[in-house]
């Protein structure tokens, strides 16, 4: 078992667990980031989504094992390389999903329902909807929206429609950005897009995402909740982060948004600074 541990860890793709940071967003923007009880429930929700997302990756890797084996960037994945058999991979996926569901149910029933919705999206995506252009990117973005809703249910606070819109647009930007980066590689088991469509879509989504966030910071309900207009001060960090991502996408490829975030210090600093500043502004007036 010990000798197989590194293979199992790689199969879970733990660096992608950063995506579950979207679960924390409602706590940050509702002023509950300093509430130990609320953050404890949010932390358990994050853990449940980490397990569920890894279960989804395992199912996807089993279904994509043939195309991944022919892809230079994906052939080293444990299932594609044969290091992890399809039977053990599916058994592990089922176990992770079950444990994640149990943890979510221990938070609230609504969190468990949102986790179930996320698993349904993940499995349906892997089973074939990932091959439908446009819809596949929207499904990926919907998975991030579900994370936000789960974070709100864990506290619990009402889900902000502004936060849902901004999260959906940002996730959609990253989804289409990944498609743009992958467009020059092997087709594999993914949809085919004209490069001109991807380029225009990525730049359009980048602009709309920034505008939506700015509108969120100056919306009357946001000002009423925060108690000031200071959340607008975080907008330059969002603009820098989006433009920095576009730079990396066009200059370096940025095939994996999560790896890009971890590997690019200016982008990582901007994201951390945004989170700290937003939390300080909201907490200072809550």
Image: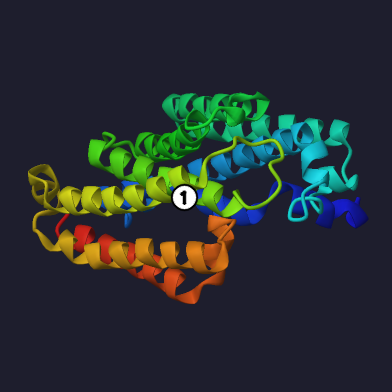
Horizontal side of 99 relative to 260 (left or right) equals right
Q: Which residue is mark 1?
A: 174
Q: Secondary structure at mark 1?
A: helix
Q: Position of residue 16 (x, y in %)?
A: 59, 52
Q: Residue 175, percent across and down? A: 49, 45
Q: Residue at x 75, y 53 (%)?
A: 10
Mark 1 burial class by Cα count in 10 Å: few <14, some 14-19, many 20+: many
- Picture coordinates of residue 188, whole percent (x, y): 72, 40
Horizontal placement of 269 versus 236: left or right?
Answer: right
Q: Farthest residue in the bottom direction?
A: 265
Q: Position of residue 216 (x, y in %)?
A: 19, 48
Relative to 210, say whether 149 is above or below: above
The quadrant of the rendering that contains the C terminus is: bottom left
100 horizontally vs 104: left or right: right
Q: How is the image coloured?
A: rainbow
Name which quarter of the figure residue 266 lies in: bottom left
Q: Nearer the viewer, residue 246 or 65?
A: 246
Residue placed at 74% from the left, 39% from the top?
Answer: 61
Task: Kindly tell me whether residue 42 is visible in this rendering.
Answer: no
Instruction: Name the residue rendered at 44%, 67% in the picture.
Output: 247
> Would residue 274 be found to the left or right of residue 50 on screen?
left
Tell me if residue 125 comes above or below residue 66 in the rendering: above
Q: Examine the image and state in which quarter residue 161 appears.
A: top left
Work out whether 28 lies above or below 147: below
């Amino acid at each position: 078992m010990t000798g197989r541990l590194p293979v199992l860890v790689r199969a879970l793709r733990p660096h992608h667990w950063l995506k579950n940071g979207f679960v924390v967003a409602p706590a940050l923007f509702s002023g509950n980031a300093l509430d130990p009880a609320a953050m404890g429930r949010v932390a358990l929700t994050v853990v449940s989504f980490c397990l569920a997302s890894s279960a989804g990756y395992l199912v996807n890797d089993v279904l994509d094992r043939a195309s991944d084996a022919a892809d230079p960037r994906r052939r080293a994945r444990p299932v594609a390389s044969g290091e992890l058999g399809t039977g053990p991979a599916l058994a592990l996926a089922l176990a992770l999903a079950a444990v994640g569901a149990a943890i979510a149910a221990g938070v609230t029933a609504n969190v468990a329902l949102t986790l179930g919705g996320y698993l349904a999206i993940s499995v349906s995506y892997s089973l074939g909807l990932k091959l439908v252009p446009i819809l596949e990117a929207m499904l990926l973005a919907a998975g991030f929206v579900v994370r936000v809703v789960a974070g709100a249910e864990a506290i619990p606070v009402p889900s902000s429609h502004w936060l849902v819109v901004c999260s959906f647009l940002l996730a959609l930007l990253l989804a289409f950005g990944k498609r743009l980066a992958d467009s020059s590689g092997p087709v594999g088991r993914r949809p085919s897009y004209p490069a001109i469509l991807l380029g225009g879509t990525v730049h359009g989504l980048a602009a709309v995402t920034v505008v939506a966030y700015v509108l969120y910071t100056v919306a009357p309900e946001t000002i009423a909740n925060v108690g000031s207009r200071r959340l607008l001060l975080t907008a330059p960090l969002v603009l820098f982060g989006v433009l920095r991502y576009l730079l990396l996408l066009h200059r370096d490829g940025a095939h994996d948004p999560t790896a890009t975030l971890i590997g690019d210090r200016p982008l990582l600093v901007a994201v951390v600074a945004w989170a700290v500043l937003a939390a300080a502004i909201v907490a200072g007036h809550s």
